[in-house]
Image (cartoon, rainbow, N blue to C red):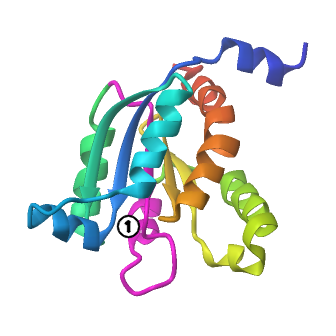
Amino acid sequence: MSAHKKHKEQAPTVLNYYVISISTSRYEKLQRKEPVVDESGDLIKEILIKAGQKVIGYDLVPDDKVKILKAFAKALDTDEVDVVVSTGGTGYSPTDVTVETIRPLFDRVIEGFSDLFRLYSEREIGSAAYLTKASAGIIKNKLVYLLPGSPDAVRLAVEKLILPEAGHLIYLIRSSK
């Protein structure tokens, strides 16, 4: 049996996820106590739960470096959390600051995630796929995924990339402990 298959067999099948949505407009509605529809954040939670995973936390924050850092600190300081998945702020508009805020904190970058995400995205949206800074990395032996705000991008990333390998990655990064 290959090492890859052996690792996958030994990997946890259920992980604890924390979801962070980054959207100034939705955050402002929330602050005004208006109804908020967080399509991408809700979709992440729905896909994870349907796949038998546990969602143990959720935050909605604006495109503000300090508030983004606080949300990630809260998620990463929660012992039970295995994986943090965020949506929003991965593009090139002036307010898209998620990647520049969080990527410097990565202990290690999961380089292949961005490559595959853009490859799969190109098949769906063409050359616009290179306009994303979607990223993944490891912080404090936890996986962190920084996804675009688009529901289609979220579905692609969670279903085709995160769910198939997150348990395997958690096994690998924690196996030496």
Q: Which residue is mark 1?
A: 101
Residue 139 visible: no
Looking at this view, name the residue that lies furthest to the bottom.
94
Count of numbered labels shown in the rendering: 1
Q: Position of residue 106 (x, y in %)?
A: 48, 53
Rendered location of residue 160, percent (x, y): 70, 44
Residue 38 occupies which quadrant of the picture?
bottom left
The vertical placement of 56 against 106, above or below, is: above
Write the start and end of the magenta stretch as one range. Answer: 80-105
177 up-or-down from 121: above or below: above
Give the residue at x 26% y 55%.
Answer: 60
Can residue 176 be seen from the camera position used here? Answer: yes
Three-letter code for the amino acid on which mark 1 is drawn: Thr
Query: Left or right of 4: which side holds 94?
Result: left
Instruction: Determine the image quadrant of residue 98.
Output: bottom left
Within 10 Å of the Cα at label 1, are there few (<14), some (14-19), or many (20+) other Cα atoms? some
Snapshot quadrant of residue 116: bottom right
Identify which residue, 117 or 138, lies in the foreground: 117
- From the image, which quarter does the N terminus lie in? top right
What residue is shown at x 52% (from left), y 22% (from top)? Answer: 52
Label 1 SS: helix
